[in-house]
Image (cartoon, rainbow, N blue to C red):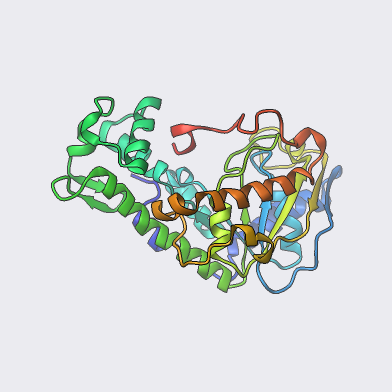
Amino acid sequence: MGGLDLKRLESIKIPRVPLLQKCLLYGLLHPNFAFCPGVEIVYDNLPDLTDKPFIFAVNHTDRYNYFPAMYPLYMKGRVVSFWAKGKYYENPILGNILSHLGTLPTVSRGYIIAKDFKRVTGRTPEAGEYRCLREIVENAADESSTSVVPEDIFRSRRNILGYEFDPDRESYRNAVNNLFGKMMELFLALHKESFEKGRDLFIFPEGTRSKTLLRGRPGIGQIALYFKDYPILPIGCSGSDKLYPGASPIAKRGRVVLRCGDPITYEDLSQYAITEEFTPFTPQAEERWGENFQGVADLVMERINGLVEPEYRFGAERESGAAEGVKRFL
């Protein structure tokens, strides 16, 4: 059936040097950027990179702007892991390619809800259905109080992405959150392994593509406050959307400026620091320290706002342009 499930997460291995990344570097990126006339990549203020991994935080202007952002890092011998949405694993071939490229598939309750709904009903949930299910899963709303969602979602026994759901033994809310917890354990373990093998982590904090900056999502805050040893390097990317105006991964003529800010260490995040042990992305952590996570994301995006050219900075509506609801997951 395809998609991201427990089995897929368990199967992902983290090689120290992913061969497919090298193939991408020398087969596509290096010929395109080094030998095609009119393609210029400028890294401004890139700090001396130590052996310790960094968390690179970059604005996401277009489909391929991680190519010019990562290419100079590759050429300096850095090895990068990056996030990819669960929906990109729907195609088994693409999913295998992403795994071998060194991606870390992002786990979300939204993806679980949307994917399970489609498997049960044969269709994508409507906006109202999706909102209702999110409220039930995140806020413990009463399942029996809604007539918006088909009853089979709550009452049919089934396998949800590798998790056996028996409605006679647990609620739909608990099943989704228990599955999410198991997937998140694997997600965090992949991060730990990636960092231990010397890989940098490459994140688009906005979580979606937009030419002008959007508000960052709290995921980067959860990672930064959990993996304390790895500083965040904010990078403002300007011009990549002109290299990649469409679906082609071959860059057109243009100039990309990647302007680096000062690294943000854990000490710099002291106002958001969490002194207790916590597990990122759990309902408990998000309920208790959600403002801390969002505060880190806002700080990172403000730094990026000062690093991009004016046409890419925050607009009047910082949330505009983001894919909302179920569109983010299917």
Where's the N terminus, which quadrant? top left
Residue at image coords 62%, 29%:
320
**Residue closest to the eye, 255 or 203:** 203
Residue at image coords 55%, 59%:
223
Count of all numbered marks drawn on residues in the image: 0
The x and y percentages for residue 3 are: 39, 46
53 vs 135, left or right, is right
Residue 22 visible somewhere in the drawing: yes
Q: Residue 231 falls in which quadrant of the image?
A: bottom right
**Residue closest to the eye, 180 or 202:** 180
Q: Residue 178 falls in which quadrant of the image?
A: bottom left
Q: Is residue 121 above or below residue 172?
A: above
Residue 14 visible somewhere in the drawing: no
261 vs 317, left or right, is right
The x and y percentages for residue 329 are: 45, 39
Extreme-left residue of the structure = 168
Where's the C terminus, which quadrant? top left
The x and y percentages for residue 308 are: 79, 42
Residue at image coords 71%, 45%:
302
Residue at image coords 48%, 44%:
88
The x and y percentages for residue 61 are: 69, 39
139 vs 96, left or right, is left
Q: Is residue 102 above or below residue 239?
A: below
**Residue closest to the eye, 169 or 145:** 145
